[in-house]
Amino acid sequence: MSRRLAIGSVVVFAAGCLLSAQQVFRAGTDLVLLTVTAARGSHTAATGLVQEDFEVFEDGVRQEILLFTREPQPISLSILIDASSSMDNKLRVAQTAAIGFCRRLGPEDVAQVTAFSNDNRIRQTFTNDIDALERAILQTRANGSTALYSAIYVALNELNMMRRRQAPDEISRQAIVVLSDGEDTTSLTHYEDLLELGKRSDVAIYAIALRDRNPTPTRRFNEADYVLRALSQSTGGRVFFVSDVNQLPVIYNQIADELAQQYTIGFISSNPARDGAWRQIGVRVAQPSVVARTRTGYFGPKQVP
């Protein structure tokens, strides 16, 4: 199978192995979609699994899986690059690694590039043009302080708006890949608001945190670590703490590999409540030593007055 991030699209109303011909769902309201990463150990992808290998639970209650595919769906990516002054001697390696990541895009995938320092600058809007993405990355210059939380907050909103523009029966994935070398020093966004928006967005967040080999602990330093870890865990992504900038190409490649080997699972909740409450999600794989990772939950539907 191709290692591209996406190799085709599947619609909710499809018949055959994805959905029974007798079943019709409204993707925008009823069908809960999960992007699931399955791994043996920390890094080895568990490929070749079938629907019967998975169990999905909502608030501890097992749910019936109604949609399953091993083919990675098209993805919309927001690539965030720290362009603060502290990145000056690391930026060239970071740019090269990010460009290599963009070259893994599939024909139906799109990405945007944002450089953040004192503020956020969208260098390139969502596109499938790899050359345009590369030019945007290379135009990034290090200057100013770090508005990390604001950059992620804006990216989440951009992806949420993109989701709302999709057709109701369109299945796709969304992810943020953010690189930063540490502290948030400038954001107007509070981290509590960022964590709340992350829970309300079906966007996986992959964070690459560059760290000094001999760091001096500070309150802000620890806060940034906590926020990046919490965001990645709650959204089904991952966080990487890296002390050597030369490891960035390897890290970006690991993320691309993971995005190329994910499963899409859909179910309709057995909970009829329309109270907008948070619902905890768990996915289990019935194979020894295989662990599944996805978003930790979602907010249920709310009755419209």
Image: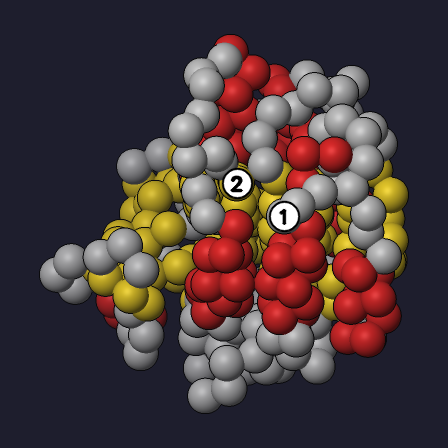
Q: What element carries label 2?
A: strand
Residue 40: percent from left, percent from top: 23, 62
Question: Which quadrant of the view contains residue 104?
Answer: bottom right
The three-letter amino acid code for the residue at tag 2 is Leu
In the picture provided, is 159 more to the left or to the right than 40?
right
Question: Residue beneath label 1, please?
Answer: 90
Seen in the picture, residue 289 relative to 299 is either above or below; the reply is below
Q: Residue at x 71, y 77 (%)?
A: 108
Question: Residue beneath label 2, please?
Answer: 210
**Relative to the observer, which residue lies in front, 190 or 185?**
185
Task: Please state the total of marks drawn on the protein image.
Answer: 2
Is label 1 in contact with label 2 (beta carbons under 8 Å)? yes
Q: What element carries label 1?
A: loop
Coloring basis for residues:
secondary structure
Q: Which residue is drawn at 65% across and 64% down?
A: 96
The image's mark for residue 166 is none
